[in-house]
Amino acid sequence: MTVSKQSLFKKFADKFNFTDEKKLTDTLKATAFKVKDGEVTDEQMTALLIVADQYGLNPFTKEIFAYPDKQNGIVPVVSVDGWSRIINQHPDMDGLEFVYDSTWITDLPGAKPCPASIECVIYRKGRTHPVRIKEFLDEVYRPPFQATKNNQPYSISGPWQSHTKRLLRHKALIQCSRIAFGFTGIYDQDEADRIIEGQAEVIINPASDPSDNAKRILPKLIKRASENASWQAAIDYAGENFAGIDLNFITQELNKAKAAAEAVLLDAQNETQLPLEQGDAAPHEKTMPPSGATDPKKPNSQHFTKAREALS
């Protein structure tokens, strides 16, 4: 460990009454980092302490914590309490206020009624004009989290659903303080979540099996679709009634069956274009289906409506 690192760790150890710097490091790695897998490196720990020291924040009271990123760095996250501290402790802070939009938004999914925007106004000592920053709900709102479990979709509400107005006010406060005081290199929880999600990779497990219900329905869908050339209707039905692994499975199999059926149809058409032999009908003598019969090459929505009823 370099001299600068030693002095930084010693500074925090003395500040928070740790006699052992290693104990300080182990404690912070276990409490000040949001880690699902892997270990926090000494370099990541040092980066967090540098930011905490720069802004005078306490990592033990969650004023600041961090997510490791994919580049072996960190995403420093300052809680609302931490932002409040650094704003109010700034020597040029001379008060603030909020201005609420008179127009209210009531149709966002899961959100409580909320002003369309909230403006934060920060007054600085020695400045003629205050700093005004307005945040708009439609630009920052996050809908409920959507996922699939046991092949069934579900949603989880978050703070944007339970505290819509408060979250928008926090956004206005944080953005205004950045402009007013030049705070850089730190993020709020919402911003950090978006950064980490932007680095995430979606992994599909090929070993996951579709449900028995999906396996049972698939042959019936293929049979109906092939009889009536109603492939798109079958895919639409799957999208309305299945999700996740089941939907991927049924859609892929339907597309395979459709391609196979089209190949058979193409072969049949090629055969009809061979030179005519004695006794063959002329091309203009095409046999028409009996009255009331359905042309098998054309989709029949009525047939697939019956299929939906049979499958449901």
Image: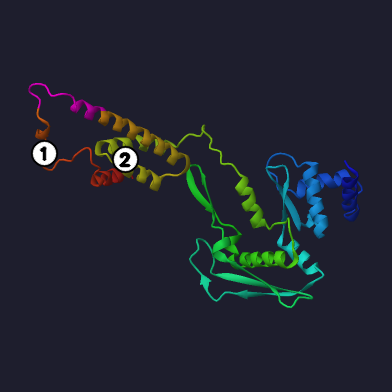
Residue 279 magenta-highlighted: yes
What amino acid does circle 1 point to?
Pro
Quick one: which residue is furthest to the left in this view?
279
User: What residue is drawn where x is 60% and y is 64%?
Assistant: 163
Residue in front for this viewpoint, 294 or 264:
264
Q: How is the image coloured?
A: rainbow
Residue in front for this viewpoint, 282 or 108:
282
Residues packed near mark 1 inside 10 Å, few (<14), some (14 to 19) or many (20 plus) = few
Q: Quadrant of the N terminus?
A: top right
Return the x and y of residue 206 as percentages of the image width and height. 51, 33
Circle on res. 275: none
Which residue is identified by label 2? 231
Secondary structure category for the residue under label 1: loop
Residue in front for this viewpoint, 49 or 303:
49
Location of residue 241 with respect to 125 vertically, above or below: above
Residue 218, quarter of the rendered image: top left
Circle on res. 290: 1
Quick one: which residue is furthest to the bottom in this view?
128
What amino acid does circle 2 point to?
Trp
Return the x and y of residue 135 as percentages of the image width and height. 61, 67
User: What residue is drawn where x is 29% and y is 35%?
Assistant: 223
- Span of residues in magenta: 267-280
Q: With 152 as the anchor, is 262 left or right in this view? A: left
Residue 288, quarter of the rendered image: top left
Instruction: Compare marks 1 and 2 and give the one earlier in the sequence.
Output: 2
Return the x and y of residue 130 as percentages of the image width and height. 71, 75
Residue 179 magenta-highlighted: no
